[in-house]
Amino acid sequence: MNSTILRTATRVLVPLFLLMSLLILWRGHNAPGGGFIGGLMAVIAVALYALAEGVAEARRFLRLDALSLAGLGLSMSIAGGLWGAAVGGAFLQGVWPFYGYVPGEGTSGWPVGSILLFDTGVFVTVLGAVCAILFALEDAVDAEPQEDQR
């Protein structure tokens, strides 16, 4: 799309959408939200960027291939799940090694650990997979002959 207003608004909105997606990700490992919703918010930012600048620019914006991002995120989620099993617990059991945080005991500290790694993996998986679908759909639309080109 060739719109100066859209391109100008995109320069402001994309960073805000990405920041909001990270806030939703960070909040989600202890409250509603998390990797899935945060990943969808990040996809909205990429979709807006693709609409304003084109799909080729949006692919460059991601820096990695969308399917590679999905694979990386899946690996991160599996690692977060295996972390609990590796320390003698069960798969997907929460492990809280940082800053002395113990869930349920009211101790101070930041609640980060295997659950944040899992949620970040979900975030990256959703971002990569949905962007891959978005780019494939856009490529299919671009491949179709337009009315004025017939």
Image (cartoon, rainbow, N blue to C red):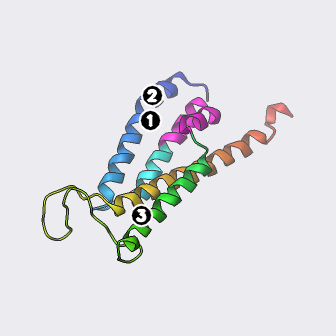
Q: Which amino acid does label 3 sit on?
A: Gly
Taking the spot 79% from the left edge, 42% from the top edge, the residue there is 144
Real-space CA distance between mark 3 and mark 2, rounded to the nearest whole angstrom: 34 Å
Quadrant showing the C terminus? top right
Residue 91 at x, y = what percent? 42, 74
Would you identify the image quadrant in which residue 149 lies? top right
**Residue at point 47%, 24% (across, down):** 8
Determine whether 2 is above or below 99 in the image: above
User: Is 85 located above or below residue 4 in the figure?
Assistant: below
In this picture, which residue range is highlighted in magenta? 45-63
At 45% from the left edge and 28% from the top edge, which residue is drawn?
11
Q: Would you say the residues marked 1 and 2 are in contact, meaning their CB atoms lie under 8 Å apart?
A: yes
Q: How far apart are marks 1 and 3 (CA)?
A: 29 Å
Task: Report the disc number at residue 11.
Answer: 2
Which residue reaches farthest top?
A: 4
Q: Extreme front residue here?
A: 87
Q: Name the residue under label 1.
A: 14
Q: Residues within 10 Å of mark 1 (few under 14, many from 20)?
A: some
Q: Looking at the image, is mark 3 or mark 2 earlier in the sequence?
A: 2
- Tell me the kind of residue under disc 1: Val
- Closest to the observer, 95 or 36: 95
Number of the front mark, 1 or 3: 3
Residue 73: percent from left, percent from top: 50, 55
Q: How many labels does the image show?
A: 3
Which SS type dominates the magenta stretch? helix
Q: In which quarter of the image is residue 70?
A: bottom right
Which amino acid, by three-letter code, is at mark 2? Arg
Closer-to-camera residue (61/13): 61
Q: In which quarter of the image is the N terminus?
A: top right
At x 74%, y 46%, the residue is 140
